[in-house]
Amino acid sequence: MDYVGLPRTANDMNNGKAAFPECHNVYIDPKSWATWKKVGHFRDGTIIVKALLSADSKSTFSGKGYFIGDCFDLIEAHPLKQNGACVTYTTSM
């Protein structure tokens, strides 16, 4: 799996009401990533995995920052090119 990134919408930057305040580690299978970069859409058979992790802002000896906590959800998604639908599987940790 290729690591895509870690989107984060913090509560303290959204008046305490971020819709999804956790961290999302996102991964995709390498063949589908190459297809998306080349043609701009996902191929049939694409696998995307998103791990949801708790996160809080803290002050530590090294300074202020956001720190990742426990993984509490794992989502596997399979976009379907022919109709734009997406099949998902969720496992709560």
Image (cartoon, helix red, strand yellow):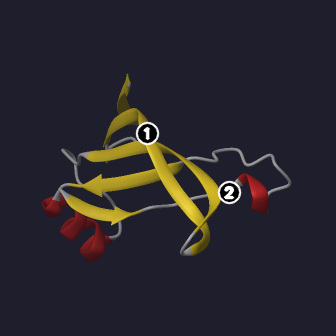
Mark 2, residues whose alpha carbon is within 10 Å: few (<14), some, or many (≥20)? many
The answer to which quarter of the image holds residue 15 is bottom right
Q: Disc 2 marks which residue?
A: 10
Q: Disc 1 marks which residue?
A: 70
Residue 58 picture location, percent across and down: 64, 59
Farthest residue toward the front?
Answer: 61
Q: Nearer the viewer, mark 2 or mark 1?
A: 1
Tell me: 18 left or right of 70. Answer: right
| SS for dot 1 | strand
Quadrant of the rendering where the C terminus is positioned: top left
Tell me: 14 left or right of 80. Answer: right
Tell me: 66 left or right of 47. Answer: right
Residue 1 picture location, percent across and down: 17, 56
Q: Is residue 5 above or below residue 17?
A: below
In this figure, what is the number of numbered marks? 2
Query: Which residue lies at the image location 52% right of the left edge and 57% below the top edge?
Result: 67
